[in-house]
Image (cartoon, rainbow, N blue to C red):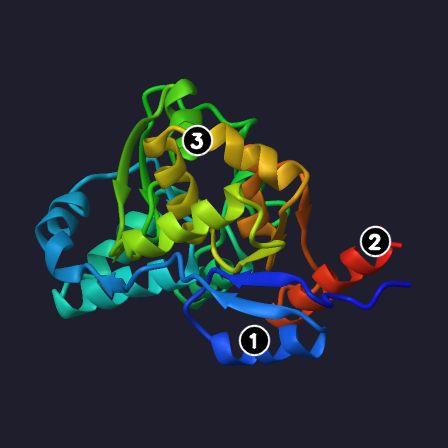
Amino acid sequence: MGIGLTGKRVVIAGARKTEEMSTIIEKQGGIPVLRPLQGTVYLADKQIETEFKELIQTDFDWVLFTTGIGLETLLELAERLTLKERFIEVIQNANVASRGYKTVGVLKKIGVKSVAVDIDGTTQGLMHSLEKFDFSNKQVLVQLHGLTVPKLTDFLEQKGAKVTEILPYQHIAPEKETIELLCSEILSEEVDAICFTTAIQVRSLFDYAKEQGFENQLIERFSDKVVAVSVGKVTTEALKDEGVARVIAPVIERMGAMIVEAARFYSRNEN
């Protein structure tokens, strides 16, 4: 059998735990390449205070929560504004849908059980669970985390919902020079694999490729010369949504497991 990542240039697209990931890549024989595709995440509570105060005066038919940390942030904001009781009342009076086990856990703490829960931790899984419900003329509040999710919004609007989004966290884009360099390396086959640890990294890469007009070339590279490696289901879903058919991902959603899975892929396919 081949020897894992021997001689492979492996891109780390995240900005966290890069030393730890680099060490694991090197132990597998690879060459780590740092190309952070995720800018700073910041709490947007000041920006959404006015919007939030207006929102909780509305009696929503449905409230969809997509991340536990986003829900916790809104609860903390509501408490700071002395509106927590009203916010919880809005949630309790609505049909609630949630994505992710952490979100379910936060809802449980405030005594709320979801009417619909994702089947696999993904947005697609949440949409599958919502398919059977009637959203005609329903007021729906959707909590997102840092990025809009057009396919979820489109899904709800196509079912007749009136959608309002709230994003308690927002992102500052990564350095343009980093994305430019990585795209050049992908297209010229100077890197072998890219490890994505969040959906945001995927969005950053493909948004730039679309702006520059070489999205199709990028997808083509991922289909043959460059391996897309994902840390878990949500990131895999983002890659698939962008048209990347071949995605390597571990069963256990951990960064170390992701790199080991990439090494196994090369060991199986380069003999």
Q: Nearer the viewer, mark 2 or mark 1?
A: 2
Dot 1 or dot 3: first in sequence order is: 1
* Residue 239, above or below 145: above
Question: Circle 2 sits on which residue?
Answer: 270
* Residue 98 seen in render: no
Calculate the distance from the C-alpha at mark 1 to the C-alpha at mark 3: 29 Å
Q: In this view, does 212 lie to the left or right of 251?
A: left
Q: In this view, does 103 lie to the left or right of 212?
A: right
Label 2, secondary structure: give it: loop
Dot 2 or dot 1: first in sequence order is: 1
Question: Circle 1 sits on which residue?
Answer: 22
The residue carrying pointer 2 sits among few (fewer than 14), some (14 to 19) or many (20 or more) residues within 10 Å by Cα, namely: few
User: Where's the N terminus, which quadrant?
Assistant: bottom right
Question: Circle 3 sits on which residue?
Answer: 214
Amino acid bearing label 2 = Glu
The residue carrying pointer 3 sits among few (fewer than 14), some (14 to 19) or many (20 or more) residues within 10 Å by Cα, namely: some
Amino acid bearing label 1 = Ser
Residue 125 rendering spot, x and y as whole percentages: 58, 40
| Residue at image coords 18%, 44% | 55
Q: In which quarter of the image is residue 191?
A: bottom right
* Residue 46 seen in render: yes
Residue 119 rendering spot, x and y as whole percentages: 63, 45
| Residue at image coords 19%, 59% | 44
Q: In this view, does 149 lie to the left or right of 86?
A: right
| Residue at image coords 24%, 39% | 59
Label 3, secondary structure: give it: loop
